Amino acid sequence: MQIAILLYDRFTALEAVGPYEILARTPGAETVFVAERAEAVRNDNRGSLGLVADRTLGEVRRPDIVVVPGGPGQTGQTGQMDNPALLDWLREADTATTWTTSVCTGSLLLAAAGLLDGRRATSHWLALDALRGLGARPTGERVVIDGKYVTAAGVSSGIDMGLTLLGRIAGDERAQAVQLLTEYDPQPPYDAGSPRKAPAHLVEELRAAGRFPRAERP
Protein backbone atom coordinates (compact mmCIF):
# COMPACT_ATOMS: atom_id res chain seq x y z
CA MET A 1 0.00 0.00 0.00
CA GLN A 2 1.42 3.36 -1.04
CA ILE A 3 0.36 6.52 0.78
CA ALA A 4 1.21 9.74 -1.08
CA ILE A 5 1.21 12.99 0.90
CA LEU A 6 1.17 15.99 -1.42
CA LEU A 7 3.41 18.98 -0.74
CA TYR A 8 3.39 22.41 -2.40
CA ASP A 9 4.83 25.80 -1.57
CA ARG A 10 3.42 27.27 1.68
CA PHE A 11 1.47 24.20 2.79
CA THR A 12 0.53 23.97 6.49
CA ALA A 13 2.96 21.60 8.18
CA LEU A 14 0.66 19.91 10.70
CA GLU A 15 -1.83 19.10 7.96
CA ALA A 16 0.80 16.89 6.32
CA VAL A 17 2.68 15.69 9.39
CA GLY A 18 -0.39 14.91 11.53
CA PRO A 19 -1.84 12.36 9.09
CA TYR A 20 1.68 11.09 8.36
CA GLU A 21 2.32 10.22 12.01
CA ILE A 22 -0.86 8.14 12.06
CA LEU A 23 -1.05 6.60 8.60
CA ALA A 24 2.65 5.72 8.40
CA ARG A 25 1.86 3.13 11.07
CA THR A 26 -0.50 1.27 8.72
CA PRO A 27 0.77 -2.32 8.36
CA GLY A 28 2.59 -2.77 5.07
CA ALA A 29 2.39 0.89 4.09
CA GLU A 30 4.97 2.86 2.14
CA THR A 31 4.52 6.57 2.87
CA VAL A 32 5.98 9.07 0.41
CA PHE A 33 5.98 12.86 0.22
CA VAL A 34 5.41 14.05 -3.36
CA ALA A 35 5.65 17.44 -5.07
CA GLU A 36 6.24 18.88 -8.52
CA ARG A 37 9.98 18.68 -7.83
CA ALA A 38 11.90 16.36 -5.51
CA GLU A 39 13.25 18.94 -3.09
CA ALA A 40 12.53 20.69 0.20
CA VAL A 41 9.13 22.38 0.18
CA ARG A 42 8.59 25.31 2.55
CA ASN A 43 5.64 25.72 4.88
CA ASP A 44 3.20 28.62 5.36
CA ASN A 45 4.90 30.11 8.42
CA ARG A 46 7.20 32.42 6.42
CA GLY A 47 8.84 29.30 5.01
CA SER A 48 10.48 28.60 8.36
CA LEU A 49 10.11 24.82 8.02
CA GLY A 50 10.68 22.55 5.06
CA LEU A 51 9.72 18.97 4.31
CA VAL A 52 11.57 17.02 1.65
CA ALA A 53 9.55 15.60 -1.21
CA ASP A 54 11.31 12.36 -2.13
CA ARG A 55 9.29 11.79 -5.31
CA THR A 56 7.94 13.95 -8.07
CA LEU A 57 4.31 13.84 -9.14
CA GLY A 58 5.33 12.00 -12.27
CA GLU A 59 6.98 9.26 -10.22
CA VAL A 60 3.88 8.53 -8.15
CA ARG A 61 0.95 7.94 -10.46
CA ARG A 62 -1.07 5.16 -8.80
CA PRO A 63 -1.00 5.60 -5.02
CA ASP A 64 -3.50 3.74 -2.87
CA ILE A 65 -4.09 6.76 -0.64
CA VAL A 66 -3.65 10.46 -1.36
CA VAL A 67 -3.45 13.05 1.43
CA VAL A 68 -3.81 16.71 0.44
CA PRO A 69 -2.97 19.33 3.08
CA GLY A 70 -4.13 22.91 2.91
CA GLY A 71 -2.35 26.22 3.28
CA PRO A 72 -3.84 29.64 4.06
CA GLY A 73 -3.68 33.03 2.44
CA GLN A 74 -2.98 34.17 -1.12
CA THR A 75 -0.13 31.68 -1.44
CA GLY A 76 -0.50 28.11 -0.13
CA GLN A 77 -3.56 26.32 -1.42
CA THR A 78 -4.90 29.46 -3.11
CA GLY A 79 -1.78 29.66 -5.23
CA GLN A 80 -2.38 26.10 -6.47
CA MET A 81 -6.04 26.40 -7.43
CA ASP A 82 -5.22 26.89 -11.10
CA ASN A 83 -2.02 24.82 -11.22
CA PRO A 84 -2.65 22.32 -14.04
CA ALA A 85 0.23 20.05 -13.03
CA LEU A 86 -1.13 19.58 -9.53
CA LEU A 87 -4.80 19.35 -10.49
CA ASP A 88 -4.12 16.91 -13.33
CA TRP A 89 -2.07 14.75 -10.96
CA LEU A 90 -4.94 14.68 -8.45
CA ARG A 91 -7.35 13.57 -11.16
CA GLU A 92 -5.00 10.88 -12.45
CA ALA A 93 -4.06 9.60 -9.00
CA ASP A 94 -7.72 9.50 -8.00
CA THR A 95 -8.47 6.97 -10.72
CA ALA A 96 -6.34 4.45 -8.81
CA THR A 97 -6.84 5.39 -5.15
CA THR A 98 -8.74 3.42 -2.59
CA TRP A 99 -8.97 6.59 -0.50
CA THR A 100 -8.58 10.23 -1.53
CA THR A 101 -8.28 12.52 1.49
CA SER A 102 -7.66 16.10 2.51
CA VAL A 103 -7.11 18.29 5.54
CA CYS A 104 -8.40 21.85 5.95
CA THR A 105 -8.35 23.78 2.65
CA GLY A 106 -6.85 20.79 0.91
CA SER A 107 -10.47 19.93 0.14
CA LEU A 108 -10.66 23.06 -2.03
CA LEU A 109 -7.94 21.55 -4.22
CA LEU A 110 -9.87 18.29 -4.48
CA ALA A 111 -12.99 20.28 -5.37
CA ALA A 112 -11.09 22.40 -7.92
CA ALA A 113 -10.03 19.15 -9.57
CA GLY A 114 -13.70 18.18 -9.83
CA LEU A 115 -13.44 15.30 -7.37
CA LEU A 116 -16.00 16.49 -4.82
CA ASP A 117 -18.90 17.46 -7.11
CA GLY A 118 -22.13 16.81 -5.22
CA ARG A 119 -20.31 15.12 -2.34
CA ARG A 120 -20.49 15.89 1.34
CA ALA A 121 -17.17 17.35 2.47
CA THR A 122 -15.62 19.60 5.06
CA SER A 123 -12.83 22.13 5.31
CA HIS A 124 -11.69 24.91 7.61
CA TRP A 125 -14.78 26.72 8.89
CA LEU A 126 -13.74 29.87 7.06
CA ALA A 127 -13.58 27.98 3.77
CA LEU A 128 -16.96 26.23 3.78
CA ASP A 129 -18.60 28.81 1.50
CA ALA A 130 -15.71 28.47 -0.96
CA LEU A 131 -16.15 24.70 -0.86
CA ARG A 132 -19.82 25.12 -1.76
CA GLY A 133 -18.86 27.40 -4.63
CA LEU A 134 -16.68 24.62 -6.03
CA GLY A 135 -19.54 22.13 -6.23
CA ALA A 136 -19.28 20.22 -2.94
CA ARG A 137 -21.89 19.96 -0.19
CA PRO A 138 -20.12 21.47 2.82
CA THR A 139 -20.69 20.35 6.39
CA GLY A 140 -19.19 21.58 9.61
CA GLU A 141 -18.35 18.06 10.80
CA ARG A 142 -14.76 17.39 11.84
CA VAL A 143 -14.24 14.35 9.56
CA VAL A 144 -16.52 13.50 6.65
CA ILE A 145 -16.55 10.26 4.64
CA ASP A 146 -18.43 10.19 1.32
CA GLY A 147 -17.55 7.08 -0.64
CA LYS A 148 -13.77 6.91 -0.88
CA TYR A 149 -13.35 10.63 -0.12
CA VAL A 150 -12.35 11.56 3.42
CA THR A 151 -12.10 15.25 4.25
CA ALA A 152 -11.09 16.84 7.55
CA ALA A 153 -11.82 20.28 8.95
CA GLY A 154 -9.16 22.66 10.30
CA VAL A 155 -5.46 22.05 10.87
CA SER A 156 -5.54 19.72 13.88
CA SER A 157 -8.33 17.54 12.50
CA GLY A 158 -5.88 15.75 10.21
CA ILE A 159 -4.95 13.55 13.17
CA ASP A 160 -8.60 12.59 13.63
CA MET A 161 -8.86 11.89 9.91
CA GLY A 162 -5.79 9.67 10.06
CA LEU A 163 -7.18 7.64 12.95
CA THR A 164 -10.57 7.35 11.27
CA LEU A 165 -8.98 6.08 8.07
CA LEU A 166 -6.58 3.76 9.89
CA GLY A 167 -9.55 2.18 11.64
CA ARG A 168 -11.23 1.56 8.28
CA ILE A 169 -8.07 0.03 6.81
CA ALA A 170 -6.53 -1.92 9.68
CA GLY A 171 -9.35 -2.23 12.21
CA ASP A 172 -10.40 -0.40 15.33
CA GLU A 173 -7.89 -2.09 17.61
CA ARG A 174 -4.95 -1.06 15.45
CA ALA A 175 -6.21 2.52 15.36
CA GLN A 176 -6.71 2.50 19.12
CA ALA A 177 -3.18 1.19 19.61
CA VAL A 178 -1.75 3.99 17.46
CA GLN A 179 -3.82 6.55 19.35
CA LEU A 180 -2.42 5.19 22.60
CA LEU A 181 1.17 5.07 21.33
CA THR A 182 0.96 8.66 20.15
CA GLU A 183 -0.88 9.57 23.38
CA TYR A 184 -3.44 11.50 21.41
CA ASP A 185 -5.72 12.57 24.25
CA PRO A 186 -6.58 16.23 23.62
CA GLN A 187 -7.23 18.33 26.70
CA PRO A 188 -6.91 21.92 25.45
CA PRO A 189 -6.72 24.75 27.97
CA TYR A 190 -9.48 26.65 26.13
CA ASP A 191 -12.83 25.62 24.67
CA ALA A 192 -12.53 27.84 21.61
CA GLY A 193 -11.75 25.34 18.87
CA SER A 194 -14.80 25.99 16.70
CA PRO A 195 -16.84 29.07 15.72
CA ARG A 196 -19.74 27.68 17.77
CA LYS A 197 -17.66 27.83 20.95
CA ALA A 198 -15.16 30.66 20.49
CA PRO A 199 -15.83 34.25 21.62
CA ALA A 200 -18.01 35.94 19.02
CA HIS A 201 -15.64 38.87 18.50
CA LEU A 202 -12.80 36.48 17.58
CA VAL A 203 -15.01 34.70 15.06
CA GLU A 204 -15.96 38.00 13.43
CA GLU A 205 -12.37 39.26 13.38
CA LEU A 206 -11.20 36.13 11.59
CA ARG A 207 -14.10 36.24 9.16
CA ALA A 208 -13.25 39.84 8.35
CA ALA A 209 -9.64 38.87 7.62
CA GLY A 210 -10.91 36.91 4.59
CA ARG A 211 -8.16 34.30 4.37
CA PHE A 212 -9.90 31.94 1.92
CA PRO A 213 -11.30 34.02 -0.96
CA ARG A 214 -11.04 31.62 -3.89
CA ALA A 215 -14.32 29.89 -4.66
CA GLU A 216 -14.18 29.49 -8.45
CA ARG A 217 -12.96 26.50 -10.41
CA PRO A 218 -10.14 27.19 -12.89
Image (cartoon, rainbow, N blue to C red):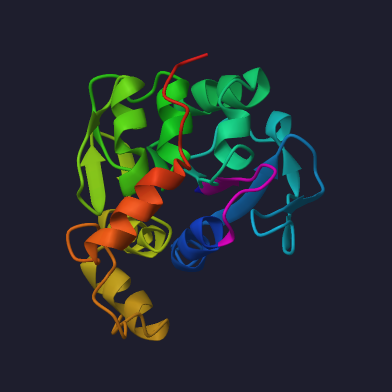
Q: Position of residue 29 (x, y in %)?
A: 51, 57
Q: Nearer the viewer, residue 197 or 205?
A: 205
Residue 26 in the figure: left or right of residue 72: left
Q: Position of residue 21 (x, y in %)?
A: 50, 68
Q: Position of residue 183 (x, y in %)?
A: 37, 85
52, above or below 112, in the image: below
- Residue 174 lies in magenta, yes or no? no
Residue 43 in the figure: left or right of residue 168: right
Do we see residue 102 in this rendering? no
Number of marks in the rendered image: 0
Q: Which residues are magenta?
A: 2-13
Residue 187 in the figure: left or right of residue 53: left
Q: Position of residue 45 (x, y in %)?
A: 65, 59
Do we see residue 100 in this rendering? yes
Q: Nearer the viewer, residue 209 or 118?
A: 209
Q: Residue at x 19, y 65 (%)?
A: 197
Q: Residue at x 30, y 19 (%)?
A: 135
Q: Residue at x 24, y 66 (%)?
A: 198
Direction top: furthest residue: 218
Q: Nearer the viewer, residue 207 or 114?
A: 207
21, above or below 212, in the image: below
Q: Residue at x 64, y 53 (%)?
A: 44
